[in-house]
Amino acid sequence: MEVTVKERQGADVDDQPPASAAEALAIIEREQSRREPGIAPFFLIWGAAWTVIGLAWAGADEGLGLWPGSAAGIATAAVIVVSAIASAVVGARLGRGVAGPSSEFGALYGWAWAIAMVGTGVLVGALARLGGPGVGVLAPALFVFVVGALYTLGGAFWRSRVDYGLGIALQVIAVLSAFTPMPWNSLLMGLGGGGAMIVVGVLRWRSSR
């Protein structure tokens, strides 16, 4: 039985093939955004964390001298623990909304954040026991570098140029901050790196709504 033009026009638009390559690409991107987990919380969590940590070390003894370095260390440890727990919770929830390999990756990605941050904190503690003026410079740089590597990994998996580019930028900031004297290195890490993560997190959150 032949399908008339009128019947064709009355058919559901979703059942019709794309009219052009641009329309087909738009459909693919729209469907991909529906399946991609909302990882904006990771940006917001760690953006806020590194802003607090950067400001804490900037005001420590080796920086502006507003409070002892031990206070900055305690604040850093507390922020890391809270952020790691929050990341693990977010990662577990990501797995619920995405089926297939992405579901497993979402959960593993969240745990990777928690494990990497706790492990990095232990390494920083070991550096602190060795003493020396370089601890205040290397500690925040090490944290930011690990965060950048994790963002790069997530961006590569989800094919997000924004996430991947931010990860690379954070690693560059980490390397530069290691050669920047106190307190400017901590301010660079906190306001530059942390601020960039917060901005990207807000943009991703708004685009997913």
Image (tube, grey):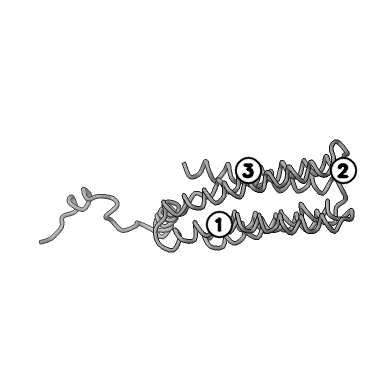
Q: Which image quadrant is residue 174 in?
A: bottom right
Q: Residues within 10 Å of mark 3 (few under 14, many from 20)?
A: some
Between 157 and 2, the one lying in front of the other is 157
Using the numbered discs, state the Cα–Cα distance from disc 1 to disc 3 in whole angstroms. Answer: 23 Å
Q: Mark on residue 43?
A: none
The amino acid type of the residue labelled 1 equals Trp
Label 1 or label 2, whichever comes before in sequence order = 2
Q: Name the residue under label 1.
A: 111
Horizontal and vertical percent for residue 60? 84, 42
Q: Quadrant of the N terminus?
A: bottom left
Judged from the image, the secondary structure of the residue bearing numbered disc 2 is: loop
Residue at mark 2 = 63
Judge from the rendering whether residue 140 lies leftward or rightward of residue 30; answer left or right: right
Q: Is residue 68 visible?
A: yes
Dot 3: element: helix
Residue 187, placed above or below residue 20: above
Task: Pick whichever, 17 or 178, lies toward us.
Answer: 178
Which residue is drawn at the image coordinates 78% and 43% (left, top)?
Answer: 72
Q: Nearer the viewer, mark 3 or mark 2?
A: 2
Secondary structure beneath disc 1? helix
Residue 112 appears left or right of 72: left
Q: Residue at x 58, y 57 (%)?
A: 161
- Say which of marks 1 and 3 sits in front: 1
Q: Where is residue 66 in the image (x, y as percent from the top left)?
A: 85, 36
Residue 46 appears at what percent x and percent y?
64, 47
Image quadrant of residue 59? top right
Name the side, left or right, on which 16 lies relative to 140: left
Q: Of the residues shown, which amino acid type is indicated by label 2?
A: Gly
Gap in angstroms between the C-alphas marked 1 and 2: 33 Å
Residue at image location 71% in from the left, 47% down from the top: 77
The mark found on residue 199 in the picture is: 3
